[in-house]
């Protein structure tokens, strides 16, 4: 029975890895081979697709733009969500449950609903085609999710810890940073993961709120079709490189992420 479970798990993992393998396979082939014949492995191995991405300004700049606004969104979201989640977990006030539900409704709404308001607002205040524009737009969705996740973890921390810290002479900022945050680091890891991944893969807002200077890699990929057709090898190489940041985030928060999924509300 145990052996059957292991075999089933291996088969399942291999099945999940097929799209990733095929993406890597396509990225290592010239476009003529991709369009010419079906092959399980590169017949004419080439790294030209990756070389073009690292040497052509548009591709390299797209990756940099994506990383800039994604990191900005993640930092802003976690910074705002931490005190907000603490307030929901520790205090009772008029309309707290309604406000908490209203935050979640922002996450439920599709991004297309907010395209026109964001576009006109950013054009008016002069931040259109800037990294902060996309980061703030994504905060509308990532902050409610982060608050919801963190509130669940904070509610699991006994209030007696807060009271004991105050008796010992801790100020609230010192208690919050040095005692409370380490206790919920698993929840922070989960929140960072979701905020980062949503902002990294989101396309609609990023495409509408940028033009040239802050254009992310996801938009660059959609505009790579030329008169000669689609360069599938180049797009596959770009796709492989877009998997790396997400994999790195999972690697660095892997321990907290596992505990977070086990203990939190997600």
Image (cartoon, rainbow, N blue to C red):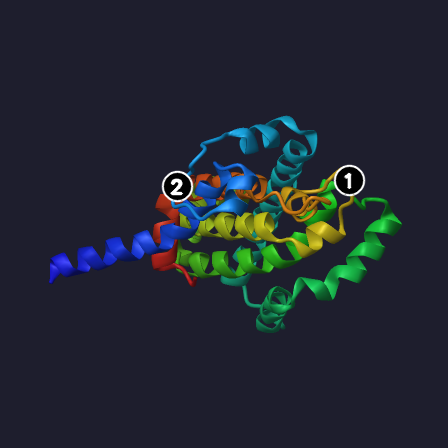
Q: Secondary structure at mark 1?
A: loop
Query: What is the number of callouts on the image?
Result: 2
Q: Residue at x 60, y 38 (%)?
A: 67
Q: Is residue 113 left or right of residue 11?
A: right
Q: Which mark is residue 212?
A: 1
Residue 174 visible in the picture? no
Q: Quadrant of the N terminus?
A: bottom left
Which callout, 1 or 2, points to the residue nearer the camera?
A: 2
> Dot 2 surroundings within 10 Å: few (below 14), some, or many (20 or more)?
some
Q: Residue at x 73, y 40 (%)?
A: 214
Residue 263: which quarter of the image?
bottom left
Read off the residue under disc 2. Answer: 41
Q: Give 189 or 42, whichever is nearer the viewer.
A: 42
Q: Is residue 129 above or below residue 194?
A: above
Q: CA distance from mark 1 to mark 2?
A: 36 Å
Give residue 171's position: percent from left, percent from top.
Answer: 52, 42
Q: Quadrant of the C terminus?
A: bottom left
Q: Give 217 or 56, whichever is nearer the viewer.
A: 56
Give residue 89's position: percent from left, percent from top.
Answer: 50, 61
Give residue 165's position: percent from left, percent from top.
Answer: 43, 46
Give residue 236's position: percent from left, percent from top.
Answer: 53, 43
């Amino acid at each position: 029975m145990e052996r059957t479970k292991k075999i089933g798990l291996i088969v399942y993992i291999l099945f999940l890895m097929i799209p990733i393998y095929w993406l890597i396979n396509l990225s290592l082939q010239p476009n003529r081979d991709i369009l010419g014949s079906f092959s399980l492995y590169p017949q004419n191995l080439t790294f030209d697709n990756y070389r073009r991405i690292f040497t052509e300004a548009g591709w390299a700049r797209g990756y940099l733009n994506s990383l800039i606004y994604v990191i900005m969104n993640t930092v802003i979201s976690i910074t705002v969500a931490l005190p907000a989640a603490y307030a929901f977990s520790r205090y009772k006030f008029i309309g707290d449950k309604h406000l908490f539900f209203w935050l979640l409704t922002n996450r439920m709404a599709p991004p297309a609903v907010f395209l026109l308001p964001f576009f006109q607002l950013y054009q008016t205040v002069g931040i259109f085609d800037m990294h902060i524009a996309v980061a703030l737009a994504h905060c509308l969705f990532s902050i409610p999710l982060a608050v919801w996740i963190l509130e669940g973890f904070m509610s699991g921390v006994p209030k007696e810890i807060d009271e004991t810290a105050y008796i010992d002479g801790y100020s609230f900022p010192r208690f919050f940073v040095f005692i409370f945050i380490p206790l919920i680091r698993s929840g922070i890891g989960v929140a960072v993961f979701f905020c980062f991944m949503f902002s990294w893969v989101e396309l609609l807002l990023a495409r509408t709120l940028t033009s040239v200077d802050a254009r992310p890699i996801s938009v660059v990929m959609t505009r790579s079709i030329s008169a000669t057709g689609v360069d599938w090898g180049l797009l596959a190489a770009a796709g492989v490189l877009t998997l790396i940041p997400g994999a790195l985030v999972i690697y660095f928060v892997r321990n907290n992420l596992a505990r977070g999924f086990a203990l939190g509300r997600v």
